[in-house]
């Protein structure tokens, strides 16, 4: 872990320093592209709200600048702008507390809140493998900010008068609470594989986890929830094409 942190810090320093005296093999490569995928989300409520994973989609644009090959590590910085559907889906009832068990194991009642954000991560990336033709494994991590755009709730019951007898949780304050904080921030990290071809460009498979450090609701002593942060796991396919490419013929 210390080794990875040292490499990430090294990449940031090299990207910020545009001097001619550089360690390792210099790169000057810029790639741009688009991507999309699937997102699983929950909200970390305190007090706890029982949940299942809420599915959503993500679509966006990616810009990558590769600056250096430091020993065997290919250092780059990645900026993205993504529209992301996140939020939460509540587990209202279980077989144990239903008066008449459902054979399929489904709850009779369901509630979900889908939140749409514009998310902007800035990632330091380390890659190992082929740059031009072949496979490359990569790790990336960095800060992410999000801007709330919209929300949509779906319920199979009257949220103003919920059935309190057969619920797994008595927490219902969230039903009539719109998102309070329009700005979100946190940390994201992930791994992936990239297939590169000199003529076709770059195809990436990216798996990423995001942990929100902010809350969607107020968290003061007077607020109901002490914590309400976003947690997401995403899987994306990204296609990049080269805008700038190093002329070094030894790069493979």
Image: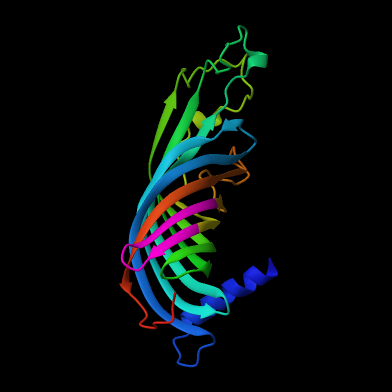
Q: Residue at x 53, y 46 (%)?
A: 233
Asked whether 71 falls inside the magenta stretch, the response is no
Asked whether 196 falls inside the magenta stretch, the response is yes
Residue 52 lies in what quarter of the image? top right
Number of numbered markers: 0
Indicate the position of residue 202 as horizontal and vertical percent values.
Answer: 38, 62
Q: 55 or 75, which is in the foreground?
A: 75
Q: Residue at x 44, y 50 (%)?
A: 236
Q: Is residue 100 above or below residue 27?
A: above
Question: Which image quadrant: the C terminus?
Answer: bottom left
- On the question of residue 9 being in view, the answer is yes
List the single residue furthest toward the top.
Answer: 100
Q: Is residue 229 above or below residue 4?
A: above
Magenta stretch secondary structure, dominant: strand
Q: Residue at x 63, y 69 (%)?
A: 4
Q: Is residue 99 above or below residue 85?
A: above
Q: Is residue 64 above or below residue 152?
A: below
Range covered by the magenta-colored residues: 193-209
Residue 151 lies in what quarter of the image? top left
Indicate the position of residue 62 as horizontal and vertical percent values.
Answer: 37, 61
- On the question of residue 126 being in view, the answer is no
Tell me if 117 is positioned left or right of 73 in this view.
left
Question: Which image quadrant: the N terminus?
Answer: bottom right
Indicate the position of residue 197 as horizontal and vertical percent values.
Answer: 37, 65
């Amino acid at each position: 872990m210390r080794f990875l942190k040292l490499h990430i810090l090294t990449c940031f320093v090299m990207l910020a320093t545009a001097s001619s005296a550089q360690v390792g093999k210099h790169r000057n490569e810029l790639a741009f592209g688009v991507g999309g995928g699937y997102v699983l989300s929950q909200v970390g409520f305190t007090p706890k709200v029982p949940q299942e994973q809420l599915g959503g989609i993500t679509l966006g644009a990616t810009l990558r600048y590769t600056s250096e090959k430091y020993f065997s590590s290919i250092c780059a910085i990645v900026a993205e702008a993504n529209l992301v559907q996140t939020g939460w889906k509540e587990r209202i009832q279980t077989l144990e507390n239903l008066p008449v068990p459902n054979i399929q194991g489904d709850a009779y009642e369901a509630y979900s809140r889908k939140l749409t954000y514009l998310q902007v991560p800035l990632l330091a990336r380390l890659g190992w493998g082929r740059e031009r033709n072949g496979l490359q494994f990569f790790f990336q991590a960095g800060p992410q900010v999000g801007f709330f755009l919209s929300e949509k709730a779906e319920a199979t019951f009257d949220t103003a008068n919920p059935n309190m007898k057969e619920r797994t949780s008595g927490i219902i304050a969230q039903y009539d609470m719109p998102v309070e904080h329009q700005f979100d921030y946190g940390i994201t990290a992930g791994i992936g594989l990239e297939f590169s071809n000199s003529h076709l460009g770059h195809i990436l498979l990216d798996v990423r986890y995001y942990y929100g450090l902010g809350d969607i609701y107020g968290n003061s002593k007077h607020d109901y929830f002490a914590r309400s942060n976003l947690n997401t796991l995403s899987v994306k396919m990204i296609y990049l094409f080269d805008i700038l490419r190093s002329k070094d013929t030894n790069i493979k």
